Image (cartoon, grey):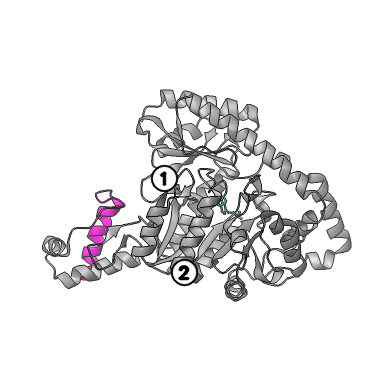
């Protein structure tokens, strides 16, 4: 290990062991040089390395600030086959979540998915019957990387227009879930050490994507209207921000909605500083008033790359998501996707098209809006009446972000509760470092009102008796 690597490693350990926290300034160049008995230029090289790894943000005007605790892969002993595998993470938030999807736990508040009981089965069965009898050759063929043209047309006319997004089918890329879209967009906009602004807290999957690109995340606080403007303007003025990742409607994990006035103000700031917004509208279909996402308020689409998915409205197993972006960006993303998985599954794309054209969409959305807002209200009242604090004042959405009493560690409680048939997502995954270590995300979308009552009652009993 060279001198500067030794210094970087020492600081990294201080960050990972919680001696230094997100937001802390590192010790000055002089003090660090003394502590490690190295020259000041060695300290600067160490800081550069920590910046590239995404741990700190350094403007060279002062000592670096800790901004992130990137996902650090666990050591694995390489098998004979994978000698050059290097370090591969053993587990991650997303892999834990995917395991929760298949869990038989009675009260699964962990996985963020629509209620399978709401699936429009009759319509889907008709579409499947038609596809497998009339279009069997096409169904089992390869298809274009950008997405099948008539599926993009259906997405434009029957899905995006409902969100006020007027997108030419040529400006749409169909992805294998919107997380894939976010991965490719991040690949285009940000590299190691680059700054990405997000809301705090934010979608854990997005943080995992940003971390995998070595980007630094500046997670900014929200007020009652959405991401707070003053910290956003400060960040845009003082850091070289490469993209702003926002969820304007029913944000994961808080179900917060950005007010219309705030949407306009955020758009104005991003135009002023010429920083692209990546808008993730996974839950936008739940909006009943002031429904326009940022992309609809930026009709030329010059400032907003827009992501959406059928995972929350219809079914996550379809793996159909989409990106709306200027044509040259769509072209770049398509090239990237070509290397990734060639194209999104032909069968699921055609299934989605058939359903979008079935005449069932309006009714399905209305039902989802009514059922999910009812469930969220029920859960919110129960949680508050038990004296627990909920983040914000959500009116609909899949999630409640809940503060645990007496700083109970959410991971410890998670294990305890999982053994007693109650699952939820620990809050730490939705922030940087341990900011939300005593928060949990409760997803209520896939449980009936009775199950919400019974499951939360069981969770509250555990909270009362839990000894950390
Ligand atoms: C905000 C947000 N974006 C994207 C996704 C991922 O969706 P997909 O299944 O389309 O990859 C999720 C899933 O939880 C989400 O909450």
Specify the label residue 428 is tagged with: 1
Cα separation between marks 2 and 1? 31 Å
Q: Position of residue 296 (x, y in %)?
A: 62, 59
Q: Quadrant of the N terminus?
A: bottom left
Question: Which of 273/201 is in front?
Answer: 273
Q: For residue 59, which quarter of the picture? A: bottom left
Farthest residue, direction right: 134
Question: Which of 19/405 is in front?
Answer: 405
Q: Position of residue 147 (x, y in %)?
A: 70, 68
Please state the extent of the stretch shown in magenta in the rendering.
Answer: 1-23
Local crowd size for mark 1, using a 10 Å CA cut-off: few (<14), some (14–19), many (≥20): many
Circle 2 — which element? loop
- Give the residue displayed 24% in from the left and 49% down from the top: 19
The answer to whether 362 is drawn above or below residue 305 in the figure is: above
Circle 1 — which element? helix
Query: Which numbered mark, 2 or 1, is in the foreground of this view?
Result: 2
The answer to whether 452 is drawn above or below residue 202 in the figure is: above
Q: Which residue is mark 2?
A: 274
- Give the residue displayed 88% in from the left and 62% down from the top: 134
Q: Position of residue 40 (x, y in %)?
A: 15, 70
Specify the label residue 15 is tagged with: none
Counting residues from the start of the chain, the first of labels 2 and 1 encountered is 2
Most common secondary structure along the magenta stretch: helix
């Amino acid at each position: 290990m060279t001198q500067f690597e030794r210094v970087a490693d020492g600081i990294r350990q201080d960050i990972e062991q919680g001696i230094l926290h997100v937001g802390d300034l590192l010790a000055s160049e002089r003090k660090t040089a003394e502590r490690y008995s190295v020259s000041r230029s060695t300290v600067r090289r160490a800081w550069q390395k920590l910046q590239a790894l995404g741990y700190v943000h350094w403007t060279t005007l002062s000592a670096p600030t800790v901004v992130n605790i990137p996902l650090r892969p666990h050591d694995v002993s390489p098998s004979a086959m994978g000698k050059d595998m290097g370090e591969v993470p053993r587990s991650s938030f997303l892999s834990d979540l995917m395991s929760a999807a298949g869990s038989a736990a009675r009260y699964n508040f962990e996985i963020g998915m629509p209620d399978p009981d709401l699936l429009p089965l009759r319509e889907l069965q008709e579409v499947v019957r038609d596809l497998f009898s009339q279009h069997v050759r096409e169904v089992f063929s390869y298809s274009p990387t950008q997405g099948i043209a008539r599926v993009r047309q259906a997405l434009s006319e029957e899905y995006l227009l409902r969100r006020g997004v007027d997108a030419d089918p040529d400006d749409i890329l169909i992805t294998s879930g919107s997380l894939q879209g976010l991965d490719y967009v991040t690949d285009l906009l940000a590299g190691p050490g680059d700054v990405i602004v997000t809301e705090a807290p934010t979608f854990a999957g997005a943080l995992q994507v940003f971390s995998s690109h070595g980007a630094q995340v500046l997670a900014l606080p929200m007020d009652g209207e959405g991401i707070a403007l003053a910290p956003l303007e400060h960040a845009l003025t003082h850091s070289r921000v490469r993209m702003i990742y926002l969820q304007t409607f029913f944000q994961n994990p808080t179900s917060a909605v950005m007010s219309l006035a705030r949407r306009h103000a955020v758009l104005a700031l991003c135009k002023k500083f010429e920083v692209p917004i990546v808008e993730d509208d996974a839950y936008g279909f739940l909006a009943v008033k002031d429904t326009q996402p940022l992309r609809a308020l930026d009709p030329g689409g010059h400032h907003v790359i827009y992501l959406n998915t059928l995972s929350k409205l219809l079914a996550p197993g379809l793996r159909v998501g989409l990106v709306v972006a200027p044509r040259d960006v769509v072209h770049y993303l398509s090239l990237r996707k070509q290397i990734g998985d060639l194209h999104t599954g032909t069968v699921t794309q055609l299934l989605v098209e058939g359903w979008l054209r079935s005449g069932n969409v309006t009714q399905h959305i209305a039902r989802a809006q009514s059922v999910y807002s009812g469930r969220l209200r029920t859960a919110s009242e129960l949680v508050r009446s038990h004296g627990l604090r909920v983040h914000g004042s959500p009116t609909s959405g899949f999630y409640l972000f809940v503060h645990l009493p007496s700083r109970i560690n959410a991971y410890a409680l998670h294990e305890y509760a999982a053994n007693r048939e109650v699952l939820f997502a620990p809050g730490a995954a939705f922030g940087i470092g341990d900011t939300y270590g005593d928060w949990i995300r409760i997803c209520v979308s896939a449980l009936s009102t009775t199950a919400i009552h019974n499951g939360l009652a069981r969770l509250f009993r555990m909270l009362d008796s839990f000894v950390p």
